[in-house]
Image (cartoon, rainbow, N blue to C red):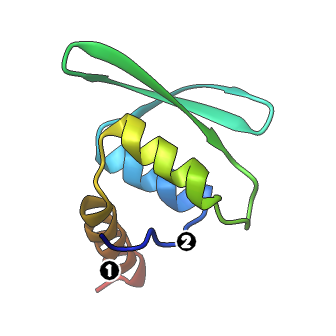
Amino acid sequence: MSKLPAITAEKLIKILGKEGFAFIRQKGSHRFYEKIIDGERVVIPIPVHHGRELKKGTLHHILKKAQISRERLKFLLSITLIFNKGV
């Protein structure tokens, strides 16, 4: 099993958007995103502290709840990096 990459909340939000999650609300520094998975509404809170990386446990919990594998995360990160460079 590979290690989780260190990413910021902003990058994770872009990835969740690619996976079909939609922003629903914000309370303080936490943004909430939702998606219907297998007929069930899944709401994921994301702590957004600009410039700071998410803690490994927080990222792991978010990925588990969103049903995104580590390999899928790495793939989506690579796509995001390619598009940000303009290649």
The residue sitting at 49% across, 43% down in the picture is 61
Task: Determine the residue positioned at 38% across, 42% down.
Answer: 64
Q: Nearer the viewer, residue 47 or 67?
A: 67
Residues at marks 2 and 1, CA–CA distance in whole angstroms: 18 Å
Residue 70 found in image quarter: bottom left
Q: Compared to 17, does 9 lie above or below? A: below
Inspect the image, locate mark 2, and give the three-letter code of the amino acid beneath it: Ala
Pick the quarter of the image with the C terminus. bottom left
- Identify the mark at residue 69; answer none if there is no mark: none
Q: Label 2: which residue?
A: 6
x, y percent for residue 74: 32, 70
> 80 above or below 46?
below
Left/right of residue 44 with respect to residue 63 in the rendered view: right
Q: Position of residue 48 (x, y in %)?
A: 69, 48
SS at badge 1: helix
Q: Is residue 59 above or below residue 81?
A: above
| Quadrant in which the N terminus appears | bottom left
The residue at 60%/63% (across/down) is 8
Q: State the SS at label 2.
A: loop
**Residue position for label 1:** 82
72 or 61: nearer the viewer? 61
Which badge, 2 or 1, is on the more N-terminal residue? 2
Q: Name the residue: 45% across, 68% down.
A: 4
